[in-house]
Amino acid sequence: MPKIVGIDLGTTNSLVAIVEDGTPRVLPGRDGSMLVPSVIYFDEGGTTFVGNPAKEKMVERPRNTVFSIKRFMGKGTEDVREDLPLLPFEVAPESEHIIRLNIFGRDYTPPELSAFILRELKRNAETALGEEIKNAVITVPAYFNDAQRQATKDAGRIAGLDVLRIVNEPTAASLAYGLDKRKQGTIAVYDFGGGTFDISILKLKDGIFEVLSTSGDTHLGGDDIDEILMRLVLNDLSQRPDIHQLQAIRKAVNKAKEELSAADRADITVQELQYRRSLTREEFNKLIDPIIERTLRPCRQALQDAVLNPANIDEVVMVGGSTRIPLVRLRVQELFGRVPHTELNPDEVVALGAAVQADILAGSRRDMLLLDVTPLSLGIETMGGVMSKIIPRNSTIPASATEMFTTFIDGQTNVKIHVLQGERELVKDCRSLAQFDLKDIPPMPAGLPRIEVKFLIDADGILSVSAQEQRTNKHQSIEVKPTYGLTDEQVEQMILESFEYAEADISARLVIEARNEAETVLNATAKGIADEQYANLSEEEKAEIAAASARLREVMRTNDHEVIRQSIERLSNATLHLAELIMNAAISKALKDKRVREIQ
């Protein structure tokens, strides 16, 4: 059976993992790092870089370097208006229902941008495993709504992945911690990442993980702490910084935040502004305490929804990079009355759990079952703009529910079904997911038609709705494509574009890699020519090195990576004798005046 990987598509960093011989492990990237920063850089030539190479451009080229895109998944401009002043992105004017970032004259949606990160993870997995990867499990915050889950699946499709399952991050984390080894117990998973926060209460019994409740905030994370510190710096400045300086401030405060997890004091230093400020951990704690309190409110709500109190919790698990902050750990310990688990790397734990879920889907583990829940209530609009809930929040999924409705006006032949998600009582306070019409109902007195509305949520938490008039069997159904998402046609177009530009993208990457190698070889050649052993070469050898160097410099300006590599090989062969002379001289110098006994 083809391998299935687990992916943690994170706000700050992303990872890919696999289970081998029963043990999950994170797969490294080409640079050897387990973490792939969730950053995308576009250069003027149209080439895209993801991860560490892109992260290095955040200050130098902020306009065309995208980060924290997960915070924009499934959202419109009204949802993120407060964030925009501190971000360097150019938001396209038509970004009403879905955010679109304009880069070099082209608009990109969050699923499209996330697909760049997923493609990088896919390549890393294929390189590490030596085979093509087509199937994946992707994790999302437990509190992601229907629109955000659909956007994540769209991103996977654009990246060329069949997303077999969308798994809630806290559920994945509990698998990674091996809490399935317990026979039974109640577990709280506190997941505080770069851009999102979740709390889930799980009950474990005989290998079955049942999520009792979940709560959180999909727009609350370490980025919010960075923004508090950024505003602290901005208040000290006499004038508004430009976007390059703004990114330098972001980088500096993030560094100080990380240092304060281990030290009692850290400096915020922004060389571009000749700015420096010292910050103690006590000052830092006062600044971030309101953010941490915002995470504790959903914790209390989740306990209430599960009809539990903190004393009923057997284990507390900490997930996400922001849980490294000492005050976060202290406040969570105070709330639940027990020391939380922090043994595993909080950056890796969700990816490891996703790999375990992938292993379950692959059929390798038959002794475990995950029963997740839907984070928000689902229902329809009824007369007077009222939200009538059909599936309440924290219902175990997959789930289905049916309600009967009727008409309000005599002779009514058409019923509009307006699908909603949220906890408020009025339609105007809930999120609209979709609308469709049940048409051609025979005219009847008001209250006589019997209209059955059925909601079905699949294992990924994605919704489909059907309506049927029972007396006439008139039927209509829809798989909900939220207002804040992409249509199938848009997703298909992006997939086609990814195929269309794949060859050009790979070619551009090969040229850049060849140029980088050529630069390295030329620098090494220059050092060799400066060495005293160069004088021992024949005139013919010196002439060949000069000619090969000149040729390599000439072809470096072309876009033919094969010609560049041929020239690299020619120069390498021309300098082989010189390299041998330098090596022999170095060995002779090292062994001079040494006795045989000393060498042994």
Image (cartoon, helix red, strand yellow):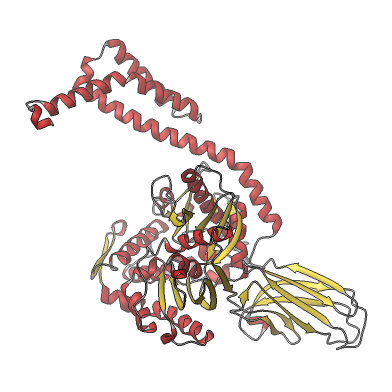
Residue 397 as seen in the image, left or right of residue 417: left
Q: Is residue 95 visible?
A: no
Residue 413 as seen in the image, left or right of residue 184: right
Residue appearing at x 63%, y 44% in the figure: 499
Residue 255 as seen in the image, left or right of residue 54: left
Residue appearing at x 57%, y 68% in the figure: 77
Q: Is residue 525 visible?
A: yes
Question: Image quarter for residue 212?
Answer: bottom right
Residue 165 image position (x, y, % from top left) = 59, 62
Identify whether 198 is placed above or below 363. Answer: below
Quadrant of the frame with the C terminus: top left
Residue 368 image position (x, y, % from top left) = 54, 67
Residue 311 as seen in the image, left or right of residue 594: right
Residue 213 image position (x, y, % from top left) = 54, 79
Residue appearing at x 39%, y 83% in the figure: 336
Residue appearing at x 58%, y 79% in the figure: 394
Q: Observer-nearest residue: 29 or 292? A: 29
Question: Image quarter for residue 516?
Answer: top left
Residue 198 image position (x, y, % from top left) = 48, 73
Q: Residue at the right extreme? A: 443
Count of labels shown?
0
